Image: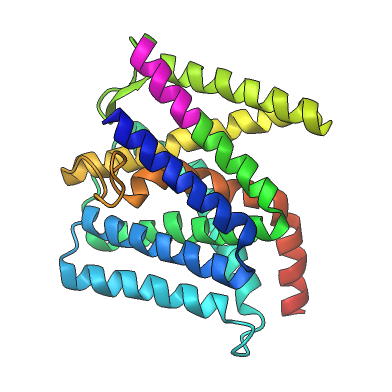
Amino acid sequence: MLKTRILTSLALAAGFLAALFLLPDMYWALLMLAFITIAFWEWGGMSGMGKPWRHVYTSLAMLFGVIVVLADDIGLLTLQPQVMFYSILAATLFWLLAAPVWLMLRFNIRQPVVLAITGFIVLFPTWLALVSMRGISPWLLLMVMATVWIADSAAYFSGKRFGKHKLAPQISPGKTWEGVLGAWLAVAVYGLVICYNLSLTYWIIVGLFGITVLSIMGDLLESLVKRQAGVKDSGSLLPGHGGVLDRIDGLTSSLPLVMFFIYFPTYYLVLESLYA
Protein backbone atom coordinates (compact mmCIF):
# COMPACT_ATOMS: atom_id res chain seq x y z
CA MET A 1 0.00 0.00 0.00
CA LEU A 2 2.76 2.45 0.96
CA LYS A 3 4.77 1.55 -2.16
CA THR A 4 1.71 2.14 -4.36
CA ARG A 5 1.06 5.44 -2.59
CA ILE A 6 4.63 6.61 -3.17
CA LEU A 7 4.67 5.56 -6.84
CA THR A 8 1.37 7.35 -7.48
CA SER A 9 2.69 10.47 -5.73
CA LEU A 10 5.85 10.48 -7.85
CA ALA A 11 3.87 10.10 -11.08
CA LEU A 12 1.48 12.88 -10.07
CA ALA A 13 4.35 15.16 -9.06
CA ALA A 14 6.16 14.66 -12.37
CA GLY A 15 3.04 15.32 -14.42
CA PHE A 16 2.06 18.30 -12.30
CA LEU A 17 5.46 19.98 -12.54
CA ALA A 18 5.60 19.50 -16.30
CA ALA A 19 2.14 21.04 -16.70
CA LEU A 20 2.84 23.84 -14.21
CA PHE A 21 5.90 25.14 -16.03
CA LEU A 22 5.24 24.16 -19.64
CA LEU A 23 1.54 24.54 -20.44
CA PRO A 24 0.09 27.80 -21.81
CA ASP A 25 -2.37 29.53 -19.48
CA MET A 26 -5.48 28.37 -21.34
CA TYR A 27 -4.44 24.71 -21.32
CA TRP A 28 -3.43 24.90 -17.67
CA ALA A 29 -6.85 26.29 -16.76
CA LEU A 30 -8.63 23.55 -18.71
CA LEU A 31 -6.42 20.79 -17.27
CA MET A 32 -7.10 21.96 -13.72
CA LEU A 33 -10.80 22.22 -14.58
CA ALA A 34 -10.73 18.58 -15.68
CA PHE A 35 -9.34 17.52 -12.30
CA ILE A 36 -11.81 19.68 -10.40
CA THR A 37 -14.65 18.25 -12.50
CA ILE A 38 -13.65 14.77 -11.31
CA ALA A 39 -13.67 16.12 -7.76
CA PHE A 40 -17.20 17.46 -8.33
CA TRP A 41 -18.26 13.98 -9.48
CA GLU A 42 -16.79 12.45 -6.32
CA TRP A 43 -18.40 15.11 -4.12
CA GLY A 44 -21.74 14.41 -5.76
CA GLY A 45 -21.39 10.75 -4.86
CA MET A 46 -20.60 11.55 -1.22
CA SER A 47 -23.58 13.92 -1.18
CA GLY A 48 -25.99 11.09 -1.89
CA MET A 49 -26.85 12.12 -5.44
CA GLY A 50 -28.00 9.44 -7.84
CA LYS A 51 -26.03 9.07 -11.06
CA PRO A 52 -28.37 11.21 -13.20
CA TRP A 53 -28.09 14.13 -10.77
CA ARG A 54 -24.34 13.59 -10.41
CA HIS A 55 -24.05 13.94 -14.18
CA VAL A 56 -26.09 17.15 -14.10
CA TYR A 57 -24.12 18.54 -11.15
CA THR A 58 -20.75 17.74 -12.69
CA SER A 59 -21.76 19.01 -16.12
CA LEU A 60 -22.97 22.33 -14.70
CA ALA A 61 -19.71 22.80 -12.82
CA MET A 62 -17.66 22.03 -15.93
CA LEU A 63 -19.82 24.27 -18.13
CA PHE A 64 -19.52 27.19 -15.73
CA GLY A 65 -15.76 26.71 -15.61
CA VAL A 66 -15.48 26.72 -19.41
CA ILE A 67 -17.58 29.91 -19.58
CA VAL A 68 -15.25 31.59 -17.07
CA VAL A 69 -12.18 30.51 -19.06
CA LEU A 70 -13.65 31.83 -22.32
CA ALA A 71 -15.35 34.89 -20.79
CA ASP A 72 -13.15 37.49 -22.49
CA ASP A 73 -13.45 35.77 -25.87
CA ILE A 74 -17.26 35.69 -25.76
CA GLY A 75 -17.68 39.29 -24.65
CA LEU A 76 -18.25 38.77 -20.90
CA LEU A 77 -15.42 41.09 -19.94
CA THR A 78 -16.50 41.62 -16.33
CA LEU A 79 -17.31 37.98 -15.55
CA GLN A 80 -13.87 36.74 -14.51
CA PRO A 81 -13.12 39.39 -11.84
CA GLN A 82 -16.67 39.15 -10.46
CA VAL A 83 -16.58 35.36 -10.24
CA MET A 84 -13.12 35.48 -8.68
CA PHE A 85 -14.10 38.07 -6.08
CA TYR A 86 -17.32 36.44 -4.90
CA SER A 87 -16.03 32.85 -5.09
CA ILE A 88 -12.88 33.53 -3.08
CA LEU A 89 -14.85 35.62 -0.58
CA ALA A 90 -17.43 32.83 -0.15
CA ALA A 91 -14.68 30.25 0.35
CA THR A 92 -12.91 32.44 2.90
CA LEU A 93 -16.07 32.96 4.94
CA PHE A 94 -16.87 29.26 4.73
CA TRP A 95 -13.47 28.06 5.93
CA LEU A 96 -13.03 30.69 8.65
CA LEU A 97 -16.59 30.67 10.02
CA ALA A 98 -18.75 27.75 8.88
CA ALA A 99 -16.27 24.88 8.58
CA PRO A 100 -14.88 25.12 12.15
CA VAL A 101 -18.43 25.01 13.56
CA TRP A 102 -19.33 22.11 11.26
CA LEU A 103 -16.29 20.18 12.47
CA MET A 104 -16.72 20.97 16.17
CA LEU A 105 -20.41 20.04 16.23
CA ARG A 106 -20.05 17.31 13.58
CA PHE A 107 -23.27 18.30 11.82
CA ASN A 108 -24.65 15.34 9.88
CA ILE A 109 -25.76 17.20 6.76
CA ARG A 110 -27.25 14.74 4.29
CA GLN A 111 -29.46 17.05 2.22
CA PRO A 112 -28.06 16.73 -1.33
CA VAL A 113 -28.93 20.34 -2.21
CA VAL A 114 -27.05 21.74 0.80
CA LEU A 115 -24.06 19.52 0.10
CA ALA A 116 -24.16 20.40 -3.60
CA ILE A 117 -23.94 24.11 -2.78
CA THR A 118 -21.16 23.38 -0.28
CA GLY A 119 -19.31 21.50 -3.01
CA PHE A 120 -19.33 24.59 -5.21
CA ILE A 121 -18.05 26.74 -2.33
CA VAL A 122 -15.28 24.22 -1.64
CA LEU A 123 -14.21 23.20 -5.14
CA PHE A 124 -14.82 26.05 -7.57
CA PRO A 125 -12.66 28.60 -5.67
CA THR A 126 -9.93 25.96 -5.49
CA TRP A 127 -9.85 25.80 -9.27
CA LEU A 128 -9.86 29.60 -9.54
CA ALA A 129 -6.97 29.79 -7.08
CA LEU A 130 -4.98 27.18 -9.03
CA VAL A 131 -5.39 29.24 -12.19
CA SER A 132 -4.91 32.71 -10.67
CA MET A 133 -1.95 31.89 -8.45
CA ARG A 134 -0.15 30.25 -11.34
CA GLY A 135 -0.81 33.46 -13.28
CA ILE A 136 1.02 35.41 -10.58
CA SER A 137 3.93 32.95 -10.48
CA PRO A 138 4.20 29.18 -10.95
CA TRP A 139 6.78 29.22 -8.16
CA LEU A 140 4.32 30.83 -5.75
CA LEU A 141 1.73 28.15 -6.47
CA LEU A 142 4.36 25.44 -6.10
CA MET A 143 5.52 26.88 -2.76
CA VAL A 144 2.00 26.90 -1.32
CA MET A 145 1.14 23.44 -2.64
CA ALA A 146 4.47 22.05 -1.44
CA THR A 147 3.64 23.35 2.05
CA VAL A 148 0.43 21.32 2.04
CA TRP A 149 2.12 18.21 0.65
CA ILE A 150 5.01 18.39 3.12
CA ALA A 151 2.61 18.90 6.02
CA ASP A 152 0.45 15.99 4.87
CA SER A 153 3.39 13.61 4.44
CA ALA A 154 5.03 14.63 7.72
CA ALA A 155 1.74 14.25 9.59
CA TYR A 156 1.24 10.80 8.08
CA PHE A 157 4.67 9.42 8.95
CA SER A 158 5.07 11.10 12.35
CA GLY A 159 1.55 10.05 13.28
CA LYS A 160 2.30 6.46 12.29
CA ARG A 161 5.53 6.45 14.31
CA PHE A 162 4.69 8.53 17.36
CA GLY A 163 0.92 9.02 17.33
CA LYS A 164 -0.83 8.43 20.66
CA HIS A 165 -3.19 11.35 21.21
CA LYS A 166 -6.11 11.46 18.78
CA LEU A 167 -6.83 14.76 17.04
CA ALA A 168 -10.46 14.10 16.08
CA PRO A 169 -11.27 10.45 16.84
CA GLN A 170 -14.91 10.69 15.81
CA ILE A 171 -14.01 12.24 12.46
CA SER A 172 -10.68 10.70 11.47
CA PRO A 173 -9.31 8.19 14.02
CA GLY A 174 -5.94 7.96 12.28
CA LYS A 175 -5.02 11.61 12.80
CA THR A 176 -3.08 12.51 15.93
CA TRP A 177 -1.69 15.58 17.65
CA GLU A 178 1.77 14.09 17.20
CA GLY A 179 1.09 14.09 13.47
CA VAL A 180 0.15 17.78 13.64
CA LEU A 181 3.37 18.54 15.52
CA GLY A 182 5.36 16.60 12.93
CA ALA A 183 3.68 18.61 10.17
CA TRP A 184 4.54 21.91 11.87
CA LEU A 185 8.17 20.89 12.39
CA ALA A 186 8.57 19.79 8.77
CA VAL A 187 6.94 22.99 7.50
CA ALA A 188 9.17 25.07 9.80
CA VAL A 189 12.28 23.46 8.28
CA TYR A 190 10.86 23.98 4.79
CA GLY A 191 10.14 27.62 5.60
CA LEU A 192 13.63 28.19 6.98
CA VAL A 193 15.17 26.77 3.81
CA ILE A 194 12.99 28.98 1.60
CA CYS A 195 13.62 32.14 3.61
CA TYR A 196 17.37 31.56 3.79
CA ASN A 197 17.83 30.76 0.10
CA LEU A 198 15.50 33.47 -1.22
CA SER A 199 16.44 36.11 1.39
CA LEU A 200 12.83 36.42 2.52
CA THR A 201 11.53 37.55 5.90
CA TYR A 202 11.19 34.72 8.40
CA TRP A 203 7.66 35.92 9.16
CA ILE A 204 6.68 33.89 6.10
CA ILE A 205 6.99 30.80 8.30
CA VAL A 206 4.02 32.06 10.33
CA GLY A 207 2.01 32.13 7.11
CA LEU A 208 3.14 28.60 6.30
CA PHE A 209 1.93 27.48 9.74
CA GLY A 210 -1.44 29.03 8.91
CA ILE A 211 -1.54 27.15 5.61
CA THR A 212 -0.78 23.94 7.53
CA VAL A 213 -3.70 24.52 9.91
CA LEU A 214 -6.03 25.25 7.01
CA SER A 215 -4.91 22.13 5.15
CA ILE A 216 -5.64 19.99 8.21
CA MET A 217 -9.10 21.57 8.42
CA GLY A 218 -9.76 20.71 4.78
CA ASP A 219 -8.61 17.15 5.37
CA LEU A 220 -10.87 16.81 8.40
CA LEU A 221 -13.91 18.22 6.62
CA GLU A 222 -13.58 15.78 3.76
CA SER A 223 -13.09 12.96 6.28
CA LEU A 224 -16.29 14.00 8.05
CA VAL A 225 -18.30 14.08 4.82
CA LYS A 226 -16.90 10.67 3.83
CA ARG A 227 -17.65 9.18 7.24
CA GLN A 228 -21.22 10.46 7.18
CA ALA A 229 -21.60 9.12 3.63
CA GLY A 230 -20.26 5.73 4.74
CA VAL A 231 -17.31 5.62 2.32
CA LYS A 232 -13.59 5.18 2.95
CA ASP A 233 -12.34 7.10 -0.09
CA SER A 234 -13.92 9.70 -2.33
CA GLY A 235 -13.05 7.59 -5.38
CA SER A 236 -10.59 5.06 -6.75
CA LEU A 237 -8.87 6.94 -9.56
CA LEU A 238 -5.50 7.29 -7.81
CA PRO A 239 -3.98 3.99 -6.56
CA GLY A 240 -2.91 4.25 -2.94
CA HIS A 241 -4.66 7.59 -2.47
CA GLY A 242 -8.30 7.03 -3.41
CA GLY A 243 -9.95 9.79 -5.40
CA VAL A 244 -8.98 13.26 -6.55
CA LEU A 245 -10.69 14.77 -3.50
CA ASP A 246 -8.55 12.61 -1.23
CA ARG A 247 -5.48 14.15 -2.86
CA ILE A 248 -6.59 17.80 -2.89
CA ASP A 249 -8.60 18.07 0.36
CA GLY A 250 -5.88 20.13 2.03
CA LEU A 251 -5.68 22.44 -0.99
CA THR A 252 -9.40 23.23 -1.00
CA SER A 253 -9.09 25.06 2.31
CA SER A 254 -5.67 26.65 1.83
CA LEU A 255 -5.36 27.88 -1.78
CA PRO A 256 -8.49 30.09 -1.82
CA LEU A 257 -7.52 31.75 1.46
CA VAL A 258 -3.99 32.44 0.27
CA MET A 259 -5.53 34.11 -2.78
CA PHE A 260 -7.86 36.10 -0.53
CA PHE A 261 -5.00 37.55 1.50
CA ILE A 262 -2.90 38.24 -1.60
CA TYR A 263 -5.55 39.77 -3.81
CA PHE A 264 -8.52 41.01 -1.80
CA PRO A 265 -7.64 44.75 -1.95
CA THR A 266 -7.04 44.39 -5.70
CA TYR A 267 -10.36 42.59 -6.16
CA TYR A 268 -12.15 45.41 -4.41
CA LEU A 269 -10.56 48.06 -6.64
CA VAL A 270 -11.33 46.05 -9.78
CA LEU A 271 -14.98 45.62 -8.79
CA GLU A 272 -15.25 49.28 -7.86
CA SER A 273 -14.06 50.24 -11.34
CA LEU A 274 -16.46 47.78 -12.98
CA TYR A 275 -19.50 49.12 -11.17
CA ALA A 276 -18.49 52.79 -11.38
Give above or below for 34 relative to 254: below
Q: Position of residue 257 (x, y in %)?
A: 59, 47
Q: Would residue 112 appear left or right of 274 to someone viewing this image?
A: left
* Residue appearing at x 76%, y 28% in the figure: 195
Give above or below for 62 relative to 91: below
Q: Main secondary structure of the magenta part?
A: helix
Q: Position of residue 203 (x, y in %)?
A: 75, 28
* Residue appearing at x 37%, y 38% in the figure: 7
Quadrant where the C terminus is found in the figure: bottom right
Query: Does the image show residue 1?
Result: yes
Colour pattern:
rainbow
Q: Position of residue 63 (x, y in %)?
A: 42, 78
Query: Does the image show residue 99?
Result: no
Q: Would residue 18 appear left or right of 155 to someone viewing this image?
A: right
Q: Is residue 99 magenta?
A: no
Give above or below for 132 relative to 227: below
Q: Would residue 232 appear left or right of 150 to someone viewing this image?
A: left
Give above or below for 47 relative to 76: above
Q: Total of numbered circles in the picture?
A: 0
Hey, which residue is sitting farthest bottom in the picture?
75
Hey, which residue is sitting farthest right in the picture?
199
Q: Image quarter for residue 226?
A: top left
Q: Image quarter for residue 53?
A: bottom left
Magenta residues, start to end: 151-161
Q: Image quarter for residue 80?
A: bottom right
Q: Would residue 128 appear left or right of 250 to someone viewing this image?
A: right
Quadrant where the N terminus is found in the figure: top left
* Residue appearing at x 50%, y 70% in the figure: 30
